[in-house]
Structure formats: structure tokens, C-alpha cells
């Protein structure tokens, strides 16, 4: 049963038209993740899943192609706008998401940290990771 659920998740991501990034987590959070939800996760406006578990968003470095695509397609902000946003948030006591150096590091982090959510290129997806949404390039 678990194998068929993982296979269905992987196939759904691979067959989705036009998407080249996937938003991933280790386990199903029990709620639908829309683009608006993804914005709230990565701007730290939504801190907990419905089940009460903490959300831990993780980014790739600012100069990574997948990060630039994610920022444009989902957050609708460029690098400068995000720097300004996080500078303002810093004075409110809110830190930006953790930044990891590679998609492999993002996958490892997501596997090890409860509530972690990150994005990777679809062709780097492994069958043990849960796809929350497919992100089409802008």
C-alpha cells in the first residue's frame, strides 16, 4: 500500500505539465498546499500545520537557479525585494528560512527534520519524498 502511494506521488509529479520544481516534505501534512500556502510557508506567515506540528521551510542559496525560479514563480519577488523583506522581518524577531547549499542537502534535511519543507528540481525527486505541489516556471 505504501509503495503504491509513493509511486502515485512520484508519477503525479513527473507527469504534471510544465512544472520543473516540486515542493517536498517527508510526510503528508494533512492539508492541501496551494501557491498561496507556499508563500505563507516561506515568508514565515504560517508556522504550524493543521495537526500542530511546526513548519520548517528550507531554501537553496540565492544564486541557485531553482531558488531564483521559486522566488519568481511562487513568492513573486526578486532577490533585492526578498533581502528588503527579511531585513524588515529581522527587526520583528523573524528569521528567514534555513539556507542549504544543494538540492541533495535539502532532501537530506527534509528527511531528517520533522515539518521540514523545501523545493528541488523535479528530476531530482526521490520516491520517499512527498510532493506537496508542482511549481511551473514563470
Image (cartoon, rainbow, N blue to C red):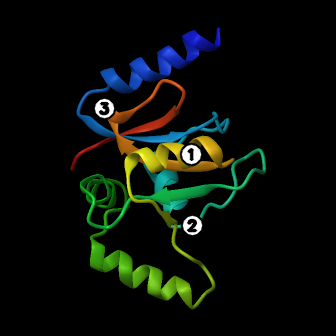
Q: State the residue lying farthest toward the right.
A: 52
Up/down of 117 relative to 6, above or below: below
Which residue corresponds to the image point at 32% horizontal and 61% vertical from the top-left? 71
Instruction: Identify the disc placed on residue 10.
Output: none
Residue at 60% over, 37% down: 26
Q: CA separation, marks 3 and 1? A: 17 Å
Q: Badge 2: how crowded within 10 Å, few (<14), some, or many (20+)?
A: some
Measure how far apart labels 1 and 2 are at the Cα level.
17 Å
Q: Secondary structure at mark 1?
A: helix
Mark identifier at residue 110: 1
Which residue is located at x 46 percent, y 80 percent?
86
Q: Are marks 1 and 2 in contact (CB under 8 Å)?
A: no
Q: Position of residue 132 (x, y in %)?
A: 50, 37
Q: Secondary structure at mark 3?
A: helix
Percent across and percent down for residue 52 are: 78, 51
User: Do residues under tags 3 and 1 come within 8 Å of each other at their CB atoms?
Assistant: no
Q: Earlier in the sequence, mark 1 or mark 2?
A: 2
Q: Secondary structure at mark 2?
A: loop
- Residue bearing mark 2: 44
Looking at marks 3 and 1 on the same chain, the residue that comes earlier in the sequence is marked by: 1
Location of the N terminus by quadrant is: top right
- Report the residue marked by disc 3: 123
Query: Mark 3, residues whose alpha carbon is within 10 Å: few (<14), some, or many (≥20)?
Result: few
Of callouts 2 and 3, the N-terminal one: 2
Along the horizontal axis of the image, is 17 left or right of 125? Answer: left
- Image point 39% across, 59% down: which residue? 101
The percent position of residue 8, horizontal first and vertical second, equals 48, 15
> In 3D space, how far apart are the residues under numbered discs 2 and 3 (Cα atoms)?
27 Å
Task: Choose mark 1 or mark 2, whichever is in front.
Answer: 1
Circle nearer the viewer, 2 or 3: 3
Work out whether residue 108 or residue 84 is closer to the camera in this orientation and state it: 108
Amino acid at each position: 500500500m505504501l509503495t503504491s502511494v509513493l509511486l502515485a506521488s512520484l508519477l503525479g509529479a513527473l507527469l504534471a505539465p510544465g512544472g520543473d520544481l516540486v515542493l517536498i516534505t517527508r510526510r503528508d501534512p494533512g492539508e492541501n498546499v496551494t501557491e498561496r500556502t507556499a508563500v505563507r510557508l516561506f515568508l514565515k506567515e504560517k508556522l504550524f500545520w493543521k495537526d500542530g506540528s511546526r513548519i520548517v521551510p528550507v531554501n537553496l542559496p540565492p544564486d541557485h537557479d531553482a531558488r531564483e525560479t521559486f522566488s519568481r514563480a511562487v513568492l513573486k519577488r526578486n532577490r533585492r525585494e526578498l533581502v528588503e523583506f527579511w531585513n524588515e522581518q529581522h527587526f520583528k524577531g523573524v528569521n528567514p528560512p534555513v539556507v542549504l547549499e544543494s538540492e541533495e542537502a535539502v532532501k537530506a534535511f527534509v528527511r531528517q527534520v520533522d515539518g521540514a519543507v523545501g523545493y528541488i528540481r523535479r528530476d531530482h525527486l526521490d520516491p520517499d519524498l512527498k510532493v506537496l505541489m508542482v511549481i511551473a516556471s514563470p
